[in-house]
Amino acid sequence: MSSNINQTGKVTSFRKKGANSLNIRGTRISAQNAQLLTSTGSSTLDFFIGGGLAVGTLCLIEEDLYNSYSHVLVKYFLTEGVANNHKLFLSSGEKPSEIILKELPSIRVPEVKTEATFQNPGLKDELKIAWRYQKQQTTFASDIQAYSYNHGYDLSKTLPEEMLKNCSISTWDPFEKNPEDCYENEQSFISFPYSHLLERISSEITSNGYRTSAKSCDNIMRLAITALGSPLWNSGSEKNQELSIIRFLYLLKGLLRTSFAVAVITMPSYILQNQVFRNRVRQVCDTVINLESFVGSDKKSNPVFKEYNGLLQLVKLPVLNTFMYPNKTSDLAFKLKRKDFIIERWHLPPEFGEDQEEPASFGCSGQKNKLDF
């Protein structure tokens, strides 16, 4: 603990060491392990994983069968970075990064109170609870104030191009192959294009000052890599492909541990069919989220799941600055609406039939009681 002392020599306040002295937009300190957290962009997912993603960690999203919903979480993650003016790095193995950026959902603008709202003096005093937000300066041309940890997004609309232009975004896709780079030495630790991607990420982190060794840092970097291991990433035999992915993830994780950066990676389900390879990938990553879609499944016709589009499983959560393993919430389901992607606990409905008779009420003696409480 350290204290602030004014000119009179009196102690004015106490400040805990290790607090968020960096004051980075879109981050907060975890009350459990004092780890710097940033939002995934989905408030419901943040709730179930402990408040958000820890800066310096690697999150894996195991895509559903037809990749119908996992891409939504990636878009949330990127849009949260745009809203807080974070540095973005996107590499896509599914479709060009420029198309993904154009499909990012729009930010929900908070309601603006009119003068008629403040005619009641009592109501005006109640609204002054958020007095510290009144002095926030607008950051974007669309006059959206980014003071919230999670802003909320509208999937029915897309971000304006002016917001994307005001944000620092770097992209590199595996199909941007240089013929000279494809002929690498077979003795290299990582094959192309994973080696080139790792060099590009390391260069972006170092050149922009996101290393923890930097004297000061007032921002974080968000990395998103989609469809890792898809045919666009293919650089040789399947065995060498799996080995390169494992080595790439290990080196990327070590790079994140010494940087103000957080990464989200998605992998197709057909890449993870080998259970041994799947377990090794899960072991490397800090957070593992599995999505199971009901598209093409018998569960879609089951009335128990009629309100949902699929199931979500928290396979692994990070263990940071603590000896206690975090509690994972089981039985999670998600549903995609026109504007929202919602994750919630899934419960079986009560089994009450229409023709089912009400159970008889018995007293202490075992005889039927005429009074029904």
Image (spheres, rainbow, N blue to C red):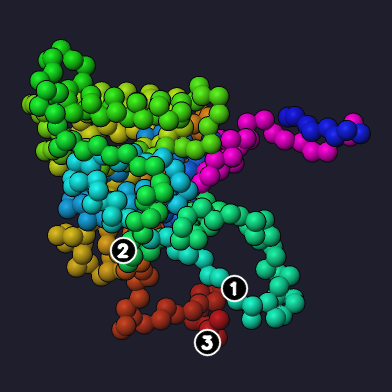
Is residue 50 in view?
no
Considering depth in this image, is 89 or 264 the residue closer to the camera?
A: 89
Alpha-carbon span between mark 3 and mark 1: 58 Å
Is residue 211 in view?
yes
Residue for point 51% across, 53% down = 139
In the rendered structure, which segment of residues is drawn in magenta? 9-34
Who comes first in sequence, dot 3 or dot 1? Answer: 1
Question: Where does the N terminus fall, quadrant-wise?
Answer: top right
What residue did someone put label 1 on?
113
Is residue 11 magenta-colored? yes
Secondary structure category for the residue under label 1: loop
Q: Foreground mark, 3 or 1?
A: 1
Residue for point 30% across, 34% down = 282
Q: Main secondary structure of the magenta part?
A: loop
Considering depth in this image, is 283 or 60 the residue closer to the camera?
A: 60
What residue did someone put label 2 on?
336
What residue did someone put label 3 on?
370
Question: Where does the C terminus fall, quadrant-wise?
Answer: bottom right
Secondary structure category for the residue under label 2: strand
Q: Residue 303 appears in which quarter of the rendering?
A: bottom left
| Label number found at residue 352 | none
- Give the amino acid type for the residue marked by disc 3 in the picture: Lys
Residue for point 11% across, 38% down = 231
User: How many callouts does the rendering have?
Assistant: 3
Secondary structure category for the residue under label 3: loop
